[in-house]
Image (cartoon, rainbow, N blue to C red):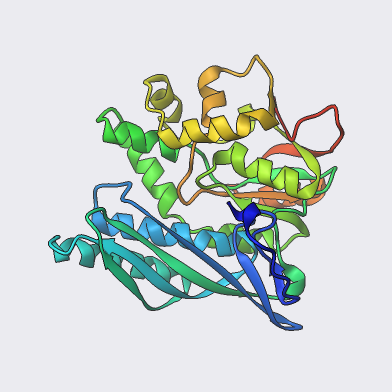
């Protein structure tokens, strides 16, 4: 749909929707720009406080993926008029506490009467115009580093079906609650060429955006991609969310996958993540240093030149 809209040129728009980036960036001066994003969704855990906190962490993630610093947020709330206001209060409190952890001020928000609960934030951050970490900057010869494990989508589906282990749910929840603030600060110590956070389109979907936007091919070693405990078991039990199937239908045409990859592992590459990690493209030497300085970071692949004989993504 965005492709059908007229393009409006504004010299101060440094990052728009053209490259499917994580957030928009608008220049205010030679040394200051705003990073803006919005995200909200339906509950993915039973506890309302935890849901609010996860929604906040997820909304903040796009600013961190650009290398920015979140400064303010506006809440977006959909809640049934006859619903339990204590539940709404817990959601708002969870979100506020996570925003306070991030050092981001909640200025207000907007709510609507809706039978289906939804919650999230519109977040504004700041960044130097010359230090933006867009998803379209990956360079041939770079290494790919990832900062979280994947599997939140299938574990969430397993939870809804009553087949998820306590260990799997606890690990997925802890991952979704963890801000990408520390990962962002760690990567900014190095010369990062490209970055994106892995959320609803899954690892393959967001890696595809990086590859296409950068004009390169990304090679991912699937055996090196960290997985949440219970993620493979969830796939093998058939707990595959509709979003995963949609991701696969959309992005699989851009993928050349080694037939030796176990089917359940390949499926997880398309799993939609909530508050997922950062996928970072940087030189091999900087990647080694980043993985040493930030223990959660894992090298999962490399960036190759693009040519007509290769697809956007190679999965090994």
Give how far across and how far down residue 150 sits, in percent: 51, 38
Residue 97 placement, left or right of 263: left
Tell me where residue 40 sits by quadrant.
Answer: bottom left
At horizontal 74% and vertical 49% (from top left) the residue drawn is 213
At horizontal 53% and vertical 73% (from top left) the residue drawn is 124
Residue 5 placement, left or right of 111: right
Q: Nearer the viewer, residue 246 or 168?
A: 246
Residue 306 placement, left or right of 71: right
Residue 199 placement, left or right of 109: right
At horizontal 60% and vertical 63% (from top left) the residue drawn is 23
Q: Answer above or below: position of 50 versus 156.
A: below
Residue 257: tell me if it is visible: yes
Count of picture labels: 0
Residue 293: tell me if it is visible: no
Q: Nearer the viewer, residue 219 or 181?
A: 219
Find the residue positioned furthest to the top: 260
Q: Nearer the viewer, residue 283 or 248?
A: 248
Give how far across and how far down residue 303 sits, in percent: 79, 40
Give how far across and how far down residue 68 sits, in percent: 62, 69
Give how far across and how far down residue 198 sits, in percent: 56, 47
Q: Answer above or below: position of 273 versus 224.
A: below
């Amino acid at each position: 749909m965005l492709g059908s809209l007229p393009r409006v040129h504004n010299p101060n728009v440094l990052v728009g929707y053209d490259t499917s980036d994580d957030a928009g960036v608008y220049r205010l001066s030679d040394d200051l720009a705003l990073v803006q994003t919005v995200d909200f969704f339906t509950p993915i855990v039973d506890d309302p406080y935890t849901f609010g906190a996860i929604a906040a962490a997820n909304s903040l993630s796009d600013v961190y993926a650009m290398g920015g610093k979140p400064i303010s947020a506006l809440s977006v709330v959909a809640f049934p008029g006859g619903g339990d206001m204590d539940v709404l209060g817990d959601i708002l409190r969870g979100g506020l506490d996570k925003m306070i952890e991030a050092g981001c001020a909640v200025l207000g928000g907007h709510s609507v009467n809706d039978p289906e609960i939804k919650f999230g934030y519109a977040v504004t951050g700041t960044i130097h115009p010359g230090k933006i970490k867009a998803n379209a900057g990956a360079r041939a010869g770079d290494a790919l580093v990832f900062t979280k494990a994947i599997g939140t989508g299938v574990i969430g589906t397993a939870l809804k079906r009553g087949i998820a282990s306590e260990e799997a749910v606890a690990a997925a929840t802890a991952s979704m609650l963890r801000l990408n603030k520390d990962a962002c600060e760690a990567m900014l110590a190095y010369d990062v060429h490209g970055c994106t956070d892995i959320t609803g389109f899954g690892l393959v979907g967001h890696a595809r955006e990086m590859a296409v936007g950068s004009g390169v091919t990304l090679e991912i070693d699937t055996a090196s991609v960290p997985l949440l405990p219970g993620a493979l078991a969830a796939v093998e039990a058939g707990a595959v969310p509709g979003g995963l199937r949609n991701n696969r239908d959309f992005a699989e045409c851009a993928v050349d996958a080694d037939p030796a990859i176990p089917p359940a592992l390949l499926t997880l590459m398309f799993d939609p993540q909530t508050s997922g990690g950062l996928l970072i493209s940087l030189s091999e030497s900087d990647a080694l240093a980043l993985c040493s300085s930030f223990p959660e970071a894992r090298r999962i692949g490399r960036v190759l030149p693009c040519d007509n004989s290769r697809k956007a993504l190679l999965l090994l």
